[in-house]
Image (cartoon, grey):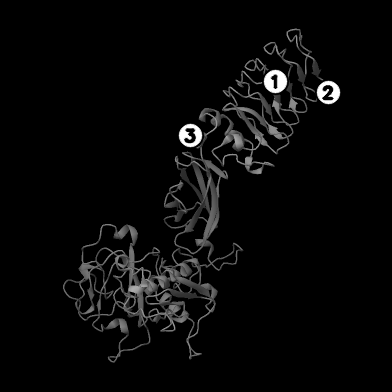
């Protein structure tokens, strides 16, 4: 096995140089160790996006990836990777969190062709969908500065930002990866006004990843170097350089550079941040809530995930990116568009039909590439059929009848729910008793059940059912079909509605319904010839007492306080 070790530290200073500026992190190239160190940076420059990008960037160094793919030339427009300074922090243009997947055509600054773009007119088929935009430096005559330009990765590119798309080799040559203002060339020009003759190559990172760094030429025996036998460390972005790079572009064209803007990719000239969360992210790119209607969803079912914004969407609408921690369990669309003027919308989520045990899945929502995100946890529970197909001890059909009791009566909050919907041995579930391979008794007395009684029909071996002393509500199912049931105790609940005649319980001997909110008249229970004990006290029942002569075995009758 190969391990990589990371330190998320506060600060990092160069050894022997106390004036060394704060850097975002450092990593062996290649090796096992890297650090991410944002503690000394201005909090407005650090967020989840920049932290995630830098973590992946420094990890990339330990995997033998460089800033330019095959070299350390920075800011290449054709090297679409988190290893590229232009994309590391996510503060210049929106970008995916990924290493390069393509080796695009080289860009020779001395022979740029504007009608060939960054891909030499031969883009990979998945380029636009996965990495739609790139940036390059150009000279802005009005400010006498180098700036960033954001353009699609596919198509023509006006490299000198003048005269439209020109045919033939661009003359004079320009520097498309050099936005360092103030570093004037010997010709008195800004770095982006003149080319230094670089050929900007591109590589696909994934095939060249070095998973076992001991195979590297830089590897030496353990203890031979300060890095514990790994390659040399590579220093990284400073806060000042990161802010300088972000200051050269206004990605959302709202009049504020990315270095000043609290919503980089959503226009918000007012910079309002009144939601009170203290995150220094503008309201225009902040989510207000992410919620699911119910805490659980059954396998193979569909539900609605609701997303709301702090302020209504503007322009062409707001795109909220959605991510499921485990799409194989809970599938969600990649994104949701909220129409202009609206501040909320819903998106369908679908639970897998193959779930056999309850599984929690975290769903995240990100607003339009903003670092602001929210999460919610949804529990996917197997349907009765999918779970009970795996049980032993009793027939799956019987499992399917008792299984819904848990969900219907808030089983997560029962006083004791041992085994329920957790094991495939129902006879070991709390107070489920079996005889001869069938459910014989269910005793949930005083167990904190809260909800409606499900239909327990078609349990051929069930003799005793006790759900007394809980918070059961709703009516008593009139479709109980339990021909062998002997005792039914539903007392001390909050059941309402009329009393069914229980005609499908011909062998019932004990019926306890006292201390509920049952109303209406009392049936004569002529279909229960074996009945011995009948207790209906403390209910708002009305009407006359029926003739119970059809109950020849009746010994106890309780009708008081009605």
Q: Quadrant of the C terminus?
A: top right
The picture places residue 414, in percent across and down from the top left corner, at 67, 41
Q: Position of residue 241 (x, y in %)?
A: 43, 80
Does any portion of residue 407 appear in the rendered image? yes
Disc 3 and disc 1 in contact, CB within 8 angstroms: no
Q: Nearer the viewer, mark 3 or mark 1?
A: 3
CA gap, disc 3 and disc 1: 35 Å
Do we see residue 309 in this rendering? no
Circles 2, 1 touching at the beta carbon (< 8 Å) = no
Image: 470 above or below 107 = above
Residue under pointer 1: 499
Q: Label 2 crowding class (10 Å Cα cut-off): few <14, some 14-19, many 20+? A: few
Quadrant housing the N terminus? bottom left
Q: Secondary structure at mark 2?
A: loop
Which residue is at a point 29% across and 57% down the rendered structure image? 126
Left or right relative to 185: residue 113? left
- Looking at the image, the residue that sits furthest to the left is 168
Residue 70 position by quadrant: bottom left
- Residue matched to label 2: 561
Of the image marks 2 and 1, the number of the one nearer the N terminus? 1
Q: Is residue 80 above or below residue 510?
A: below
**Residue density around tag 3, few if under 14, some if 14–19, many if 20 or more, within 10 Å:** some
The residue wearing badge 3 is: 389
Mark 1: secondary structure: loop
Which one is closest to the eye, mark 3 or mark 2? Answer: 3
């Amino acid at each position: 096995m190969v391990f990589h070790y990371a330190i998320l530290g506060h600060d990092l200073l160069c050894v022997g140089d106390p004036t060394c500026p704060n850097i975002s992190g450092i990593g062996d190239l290649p090796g096992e160790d890297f650090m991410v160190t944002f503690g000394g940076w201005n909090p407005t420059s650090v967020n989840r996006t920049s932290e995630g990008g830098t973590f992946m960037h420094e990890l990339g160094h330990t995997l033998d990836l460089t800033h330019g793919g095959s070299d350390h030339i920075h800011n290449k427009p054709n090297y679409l990777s988190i290893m590229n300074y232009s994309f590391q922090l996510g503060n210049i243009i929106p970008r995916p969190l990924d290493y390069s997947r393509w080796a695009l055509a080289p860009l020779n600054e001395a022979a740029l062709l504007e009608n060939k773009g960054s891909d030499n007119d031969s883009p990979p088929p998945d380029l636009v969908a996965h990495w739609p935009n790139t940036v390059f430096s150009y000279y802005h005559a009005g400010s006498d500065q180098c700036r960033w330009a954001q353009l699609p990765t596919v198509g023509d590119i006006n490299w000198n930002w003048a005269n439209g798309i020109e045919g033939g080799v661009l003359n004079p040559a320009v520097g498309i990866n050099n936005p360092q203002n103030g570093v004037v060339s010997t010709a008195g020009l800004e770095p982006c006004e003149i080319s230094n003759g670089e050929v900007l190559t591109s590589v696909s990172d994934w095939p060249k990843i070095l998973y076992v760094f001991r195979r590297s030429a830089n590897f030496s025996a353990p203890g031979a170097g300060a890095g514990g036998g790994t390659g040399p460390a590579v220093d990284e972005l400073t806060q000042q350089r990161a802010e300088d790079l972000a200051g050269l572009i206004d990605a959302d064209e709202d009049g504020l550079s990315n270095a000043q803007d609290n919503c980089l990719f959503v226009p918000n000239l007012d910079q309002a941040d009144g939601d009170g969360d203290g995150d220094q992210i503008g309201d225009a790119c902040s989510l207000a809530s992410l919620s699911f209607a119910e805490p659980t969803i059954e396998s193979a079912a569909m539900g609605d995930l609701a997303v709301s914004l702090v302020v209504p969407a503007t322009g062409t609408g707001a795109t909220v990116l959605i991510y499921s921690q485990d799409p194989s369990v809970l599938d969600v669309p990649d994104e949701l568009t909220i129409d202009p003027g609206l501040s909320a919308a819903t998106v369908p989520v679908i639970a897998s039909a193959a779930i056999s045990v309850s599984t929690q899945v975290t769903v995240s929502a990100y607003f339009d590439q903003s670092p602001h995100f929210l999460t919610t946890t949804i529990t996917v529970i197997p349907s009765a059929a999918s779970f009970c197909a795996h049980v032993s001890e009793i027939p799956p059909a019987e499992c399917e009848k008792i299984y819904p009791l848990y969900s219907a009566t808030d089983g997560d909050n029962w006083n004791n729910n041992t085994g329920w919907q957790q094991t495939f041995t129902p006879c070991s579930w709390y107070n489920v008793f079996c005889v001869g391979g069938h459910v014989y008794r269910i005793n949930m007395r005083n167990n904190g059940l809260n909800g409606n009684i499900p239909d327990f029909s078609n349990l051929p071996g069930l003799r005793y059912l006790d759900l007394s002393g809980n918070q059961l509500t709703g009516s008593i199912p009139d479709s109980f079909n339990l021909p062998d049931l002997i005792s039914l105790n539903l007392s001390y609940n909050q059941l309402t509605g009329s009393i069914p005649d229980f005609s499908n319980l011909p062998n019932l001997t004990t019926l306890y319904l006292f201390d509920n909110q049952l109303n209406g008249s009392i049936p004569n229970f002529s279909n229960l010839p074996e009945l011995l004990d009948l207790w209906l006290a403390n209910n708002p029942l009305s009407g006359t007492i029926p003739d119970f002569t059809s109950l020849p075995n009746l010994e106890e009758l309780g009708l008081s306080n009605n």
